[in-house]
Amino acid sequence: MVKMKLVKWVPLILAVVLLGFIGHGSHASFTPVDNYLIACGSSKNVTFLGHTFVPDLVQSSISLKSQGNSIVATSNSSAPFAVYQSARVFPGTASYKFGIEQEGRHWVRLYFYPLPDSGHNLTSASMTVITENFVLLNNFSFKNYNGSYMFKEYAINVTSDSLTVTFIPSNNSVAFINAIEVVSVPDELIPDQALALSPSGPFSGLSEFALETVYRLNMGGPLLTAENDTLGRTWENDEKYLHVNSSAVSVSVSPATIQYRAAATPQIGPNWVYATAQTMGNSNVANSNFNITWVFPVDPNFTYFVRYHFCDIMSVSMNTLVFNLYINSDLAFGSLDLSTLTGYLAAPYYKDFVSNSSADTDTLTISVGPDTRADFINALLNGLEIMKINNEARSLDGISPVETLLVSQPSKKNKMGIIIGSVVGASAALVFISLCYCFLVARRSKTPQQGSTWLPLPLYGNSQTMTKMSTTSQKSGTASCISLASSNLGRLFMFQEIMDATNKFDESLLLGVGGFGRVYKGTLEDGTKVAVKRGNPRSEQGLAEFRTEIEMLSKLRHRHLVSLIGYCDERSEMILVYEYMANGPLRSHLYGTDLPPLSWKQRLEICIGAARGLHYLHTGAAQSIIHRDVKTTNILLDENFVAKVADFGLSKAGPAIDQTHVSTAVKGSFGYLDPEYFRRQQLTEKSDVYSFGVVLMEVLCTRPALNPVLPREQVNIAEWAMSWQKKGMLDQIMDSNLAGKVNPTSLKKFGETAEKCLAEHGVDRPSMGDVLWNLEYALQLEETSSALTEPEDNSTNHIPGIPLTPLEPFDNSLSMIDGVNSGTDADAEDAATSAVFSQLVNPRGR
Ligand SMILES: *[C@@H]1O[C@H](CO)[C@@H](O)[C@H](O)[C@H]1NC(C)=O
Ligand SMILES: *[C@@H]1O[C@H](CO)[C@@H](O)[C@H](O)[C@H]1NC(C)=O
Ligand SMILES: *[C@@H]1O[C@H](CO)[C@@H](O)[C@H](O)[C@H]1NC(C)=O
Ligand SMILES: *[C@@H]1O[C@H](CO)[C@@H](O)[C@H](O)[C@H]1NC(C)=O
């Protein structure tokens, strides 16, 4: 929180004097179009940190409406700064409305100080502060606050010609405010997209969210105040957040040394921020391999926007400083080489991420640590910003949306209420589109399906919310919504049953921990073994994924898809109960564990199973479904090593018949992400095909999709394996356990299949059906060869005499496909698959 305690005055004033003295003219300035700085209740101009705050009622573009007359409170002696010397006190709901000339993000800065000698008991005042769309403060009171005054900064995208800030007193008290700023922010300051972590993937649509500054730090440097920052921001020193004080050594250069090149501008951060940094100190001491870590207490119920500011002010030559960034225990960015990114030394640079707090603590930890492959072991950080992102209720404080806060007021319906109500109503559509995880209803011409319905759980049981949601969907006509309760979604478990099944979530039964939450092994009363996935209730993303998973899985039944047995949503728990997969994720059989290596044939069978599952998703169901998170940890193996595709949390209905793609924010896992989807944000089934190509390479080479520890050209398996495949030398990088045990033609077919899946453009990639066919063929080649070399092995289902030259798909006979099919367990649920096979045999549209 950018809050300065009273004890901070002295360093503050010193810093201001110091910087005022040397800092002038050191950066280009930005002139905000909207620039309101008002001293509420004041009768005169007030100067604070070089800025003039004018009385609140002298500008015609600001209006104040209040229930009951507002009261002016002033104090001459006690206020910490001039800007806190007066206040306006409201006995009822009151709003300041600011005329906005230029739409876009604006700082909304609020200054509160409960003037002790004002004649009102402001310390016990309890208040809620909202804008038209967002909740800024909910029932805030100085009684429960450990500071003597409070400064809050928000960045809100205003998309109309005014912004209204409303103060609502609660608990029969009053509300008050000392000063307000509403100031334009340059558009480029906060991007629309940043990289989200755990699960990792691009996070789009930031511009729709309100942000609250919770920390803004100048690493290794002095406090910088509004006067020293062209955007009026405050940057604190970082030392009190350092995890181990001695881990960091601060360095500094003259701010004049800082050269803004391409990446950052003086608006992104003043040169004072970039001219100082925390580093690991003398890089060549023994055992210098550690991280510098900062720990920030945060509200775990929110997601945060994190910006790292860098400027290499310590290297003497280019490309010597290479280091890693972490958020919590996640690698946020590996092998960051500033000089390559900026082309210069001492050139500011920044990187943005979106992250939750760490799973078990109410903190966000930020670390920088050396990349051990670099020439010098060191790392640095110059500045850091952490901003809270509003939640689903469009709130930055609590879970009540603006609507309920206004409604809960005992007020008579007066003029004010109506004004605010209508503004709120107008923006409701936007609110609920973001609340609502509605899918496009795609209809396949062959199987017209009425009322495919996809809809979220009611959020916080707010009936008003639900009503608005359905209105939205009717209007748009593209989506239709129902609540979960009204559809058949498998068994609804009581929380107690889950507790019994998992022995109260016994940690010894823990099967895994993922972005969504923890997975436990459980045993139901009737002895059925199950996997119990318990969502992290703090994860907002989790809620949407929880719904999606239930809705998707309850509609789908297939031998190669993990079945959902039921769910539990009692006490705001998000628990999913699945069939138990005894052999766990495919990945654990490839690397990183002591499990015995899989044979080539087993690997092919597993890939074929997974391909069947995906093929069914794409074409077998009434509505095409795109998985979006195909990876080796989402392919699970049962006790017989039958592969099943799991984790439908990110799945999306595919494009309707008359569309070619679904436009969507990019989600998924790095290393598996289709580059075309990433660039164009247009989702098709071919994005899953790409990810599956990565899986194939992983199965062959037994290494992670991304391994930042490897030399640069090897980091990404897709690039690395493709370069060897193109040379026809994939066997050089394959799992050494397979050496000499793979039929070369089978390997060749497999390599070609993976290569096609990894094609740059979706149109050049095969369908999952083609992939399946090719893998079946690779298996045939393997079995045939083993049959030829080991004639005693008669148990395999091979077709004797199959030509060993690779064939193109579809110029083949039916019998071969039948042969494969008869070899697998073609039970009733594979009916959909046989429909698929008939398409394969008689492909249309090729
Ligand atoms: C107060 O400040 C405003 C803006 O800086 C200025 O236009 C105005 O003249 C000032 N008023 C007084 C009384 O100094
Ligand atoms: C503000 O929101 C509008 C509408 O969503 C968007 O077009 C615009 O780019 C946003 N501006 C910023 C600076 O984020
Ligand atoms: C997070 O939300 C939960 C449930 O709404 C609430 O009980 C808890 O106090 C919140 N945590 C914080 C730190 O506000
Ligand atoms: C730095 O922190 C990350 C995340 O917690 C951890 O994975 C890594 O091993 C740490 N590096 C060192 C050198 O301690």
Image (cartoon, rainbow, N blue to C red):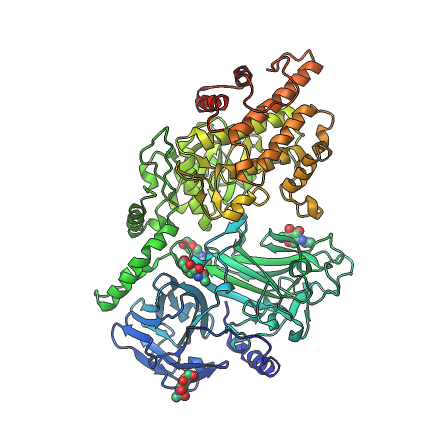
Residue at screen point 27% across, 73% down: 66
| Residue at the extreme front | 846
Residue 566, percent across and down? 41, 34
Horizontal arrangement in the rendering, residue 376 relative to residue 58 (left or right): right
Residue depicted at x 35% and y 52%: 432
- In the foreground, 494 or 290: 290
* Residue 668 in the image: above or below residue 58: above
At x 39%, y 69%, the residue is: 141
- Quarter occupied by residue 282: bottom right
Q: Residue at position x 50%, y 55% from top?
A: 193
Q: Is residue 284 visible in this depiction of the protein? A: yes
Locate residue 91, reporting x and y percent: 28, 73
Which percent across, then down, holds residue 154?
A: 44, 66
Relative to 61, say whether 594 is above or below. above
Quadrant for residue 273, please give it: bottom right
Vertical relation: 728 (above or below) 386: above
Query: Residue 148: x percent and y percent?
Result: 46, 75
Is there any visible trace of residue 563 in the rendered image? no
Q: How many marks?
A: 0
Q: Nearer the viewer, residue 676 or 633?
A: 676
Q: Nearer the viewer, residue 436 or 439?
A: 439
Q: Quadrant of ligand 2?
A: bottom left
**Please, is residue 745 above or below residue 368 in the view?**
above
